[in-house]
Amino acid sequence: MLWLGTSFKMTKTRAEAAAYAARLKEAVGDGVEGVRPFVIPSATAIATVADTLGRDSPALVGAQNTHWADSGAWTGEISVPQAADAGARLIEIGHSERRAHFGESDATVRLKTAAVLRHGLVPLVCVGESEETRAAGMASATAAVLAQAAAALDGAANPRHVLIAYEPLWAIGEHGREPRPQDIAPVLAELAQLPVRGVLYGGSVNEGNAAGLLRLPGVDGLFVGRAAWDAEAYVRLLAMAAS
Ligand code: 13P
């Protein structure tokens, strides 16, 4: 089973997310052969997307972040039970944008991973090395990524339910570089040794490079940003992954 999903990051109104979800529902029908689609909208649109897709849709809806506590005085935060109540079945944790701009650390990633597992949702834990770490060589990149993954899984009751997304910082977003296979294959091969549910690649994935990335050993799927924000483009990526 290949995982192929997208995070909308901080884009789309509820109306835009609903239109996207309606197109996706039509495209996935009862399921996409060999592919598990997932969509991670902003918190405001989780329920919109989940309700539009239908609660038993083969496409999973996710949240981009969570708090580790179930409830309490944590202004501005959303808990796993709240995200699940809105329709989320998967929760993204530790994206590099959250680590860089919002103080997310290996310690909070570990707490959040444990909380998601406790409630039976799928944690999608993002790991990836910085440009500077990569410049120091493959060994330092691999060590940094494995350390992040180990921190997330530390003490996890059931690591086999965890998805890891390898997203090197130098490959993500508008200023990201498309990876060459030799840049990422050694790291993916190491991550593939972990006792987890699957390892996804993310960062500058597009319709031109997706098939090649999916063929890399150790890759169980792709986590796409910009190239899947248009529903038609995402549907084409799903069809490509299915073939
Ligand atoms: P891009 O595909 O836009 O580079 O973003 C990847 C990403 O950060 C997915 O979480």
Image (spheres, helix red, strand yellow):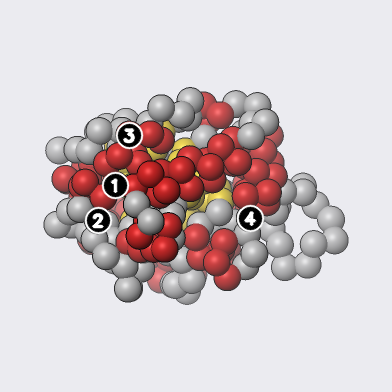
Disc 2 from disc 4: Cα separation: 25 Å
Give me the disc on residue 131.
Answer: none
The tag earlier along the polypeptide, 3 or 1, is: 1
Percent position (x, y) of residue 119? 67, 36
Classed neighbour count for the residue bearing mark 4: other residues with Cα under 10 Å, few (<14), some (14–19), many (≥20): some
Classed neighbour count for the residue bearing mark 3: other residues with Cα under 10 Å, few (<14), some (14–19), many (≥20): some
Cβ–Cβ under 8 Å for marks 2 and 4: no
The amino acid on which the numbered mark 3 sits, given as a three-letter code, is: Ala
Disc 1 from disc 4: Cα separation: 23 Å
Observer-nearest of 176 and 158: 176
Residue identifier under label 4: 105
The secondary element bearing badge 2 is classed as: loop
Quarter of the image for residue 76 reads bottom right
Disc 3 from disc 1: Cα separation: 9 Å
Residue identifier under label 1: 184
Residue at the outermost front position: 136
Cβ–Cβ under 8 Å for marks 3 and 2: no
Quarter of the image for residue 99 reads bottom right
